[in-house]
Amino acid sequence: MVNIDWQAFITVFASAIGFTTLIVACFSLGVRFLTTAQNSAPKARKGNSKAQQVESLNLVGAYLLFAVCLSALAYGIWLIIPFVSH
Amino acid sequence: MDPIFIVGLVVAIALFFDFTNGFHDTANAMATPIATGALKPKVAVGIAALMNLAGAFLSTTVAKTISVDMINPGISITAQMVFAGLTGAILWNLTTWFLGLPSSSSHALFGGLIGSTMAYFGAAGVNFTKMIEKVFIPALFAPVVAGIVAFVATKVAYLITSRSQAERKAKDISTGRQKFKVGQIFSSSLVALSHGTNDAQKTMGVITLVLVAGGVQADGSHVEIWVVLAAALAIALGTYAGGWRIIKTLGTGLSEIRPPQGFAAEVSTGVTILASSKFGFALSTTQVASGSVIGVGLGRKGGVVRWNKAGQIFVGWLLTLPAAGLVGAASAYLTMQGDWGLIVDGILTAAVAAAIFTISRRNKINSTNLLSEVEGASEVVLSARQIKANAKAAKKAEAKAKKKSKKKGKK
């Protein structure tokens, strides 16, 4: 009898879609924030206080999100290297 | 003949298989970053090679010997059987590379070994149920799972980074989607690293198996350090050689890929592979990577997937096991004839491999013409934008040439 481990399959599917979406969403949001920050940079340099605020807030958000992505990368490496994760 | 000589021959051919494994699978990690321009082709294969080298060293503590579940446990595998099986795997890998089809190197290896086992012991030696479970079912699931995951990821990436037309016009804002290229460098490297830990290990397992069978090594409880070194180097060299034909198919032949899609595809591939190995539902990296590319192709508005190419790839997957098996079986009959058969088999394999390489030179695809319009094994349909860009580049080159010739004329 062909035996399909449906439970393992569903676990793989669910975790793959969950983690991938999370990582891609974080990176995309980071890209969005970073772009917004860069777009307000010229005005901020001219001394526009609102633009300065927009720039710094977006930058902080972007860096935080990229940090989340980097930690996901670190987790991935940890999973790959057997003598660390087993 | 000296058994040590036979063992040496099998080790050599196993390392050659490892090399083909490397260049066949470079595309899994590096086709998308090359296609979007995140990495230059040569840099990409360089990173992939380093990652594979590192991965090969990192993996050796876990799996010691290859487990071929599909071969019934009562069968004792000999060096000759492994030799025959490897020739099947190598020739199928080279054939699919020539056709530009991404296909699983592991399945080719299994197919070759199963073929030679059947030649030696008949159908009783092979567990067909396991074969369906381990090869055919995953071949159906891998592209579907990766495809759906990548599709959703692409939708998310585009949704989050989208800016309305009004916003773009009023504030002169770009979407910043080119920044995904930076992410691609990391995501593709991770895929390459996981490939190194998985695949070099298979060759080490095969070599160890043969060393034990040949009485060179007492038991299969460890992998000799020279085996690790040789296998790591072979797969890294193969990766660096770059299977450009397959990179072309996966990077531009299935769909036109842009940076957010490339990033989504690589993250999907990496996460799906890691999840599959963590939760014990083994999936082929190649099949997952192909599924991801199709998924991201469907996920972008206006994205087109060339289904006839996808169909060819899928047929290739279904043929991998039987085709490598047939060659493996034919090789096995040769090796049964005695030592001369083994040597003839080796020479034949080398000759066919050389022939494939020679024919492939007629329409060479390498790092320089990879992304340009060339007639290749994998026909590439260009988008209107690419055609325009190419025409522009051609005009520029022409103008330059004219200037040069004018200067020369003056002199």
Image (cartoon, coloured by chain):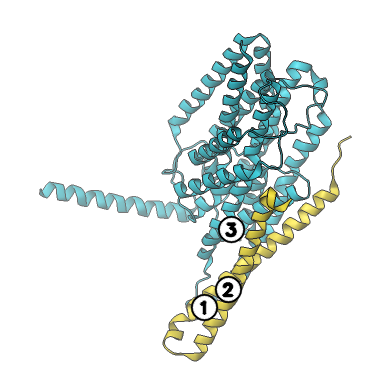
Residue A62's label in the rendered image is 2
Residue B9's label in the rendered image is none
Tag 2: residue type? Ala
Residue at 38%, 52% (x, y): give it: B391
x and y percentages locating residue A50 in the rendered image:
52, 89
Q: How far separated are the C-alphas under marks 2 and 3? A: 17 Å
Tag 1: residue type? Ala
Tell me if mark 2 has few (under 14), some (14-19) or many (20+) residues whose alpha carbon lies within 10 angstroms of its own: many
* Mark 1 lies on residue: A37
Q: Closer to the camera, B141 or B348?
A: B348
Q: Secondary structure at mark 3?
A: helix
Tag 3: residue type? Phe
* Mark 3 lies on residue: B263
Q: How far separated are the C-alphas under marks 2 and 1? A: 9 Å
Q: Marks 1 and 2: in contact by CB < 8 Å?
A: yes
* Residue B357 versus residue B162 in the image, above or below: above
Q: Closer to the camera, B224 or B346?
A: B224
The residue sitting at the left extreme is B411
Asked if both marks, 2 and 3, belong to the same chain, the answer given is no
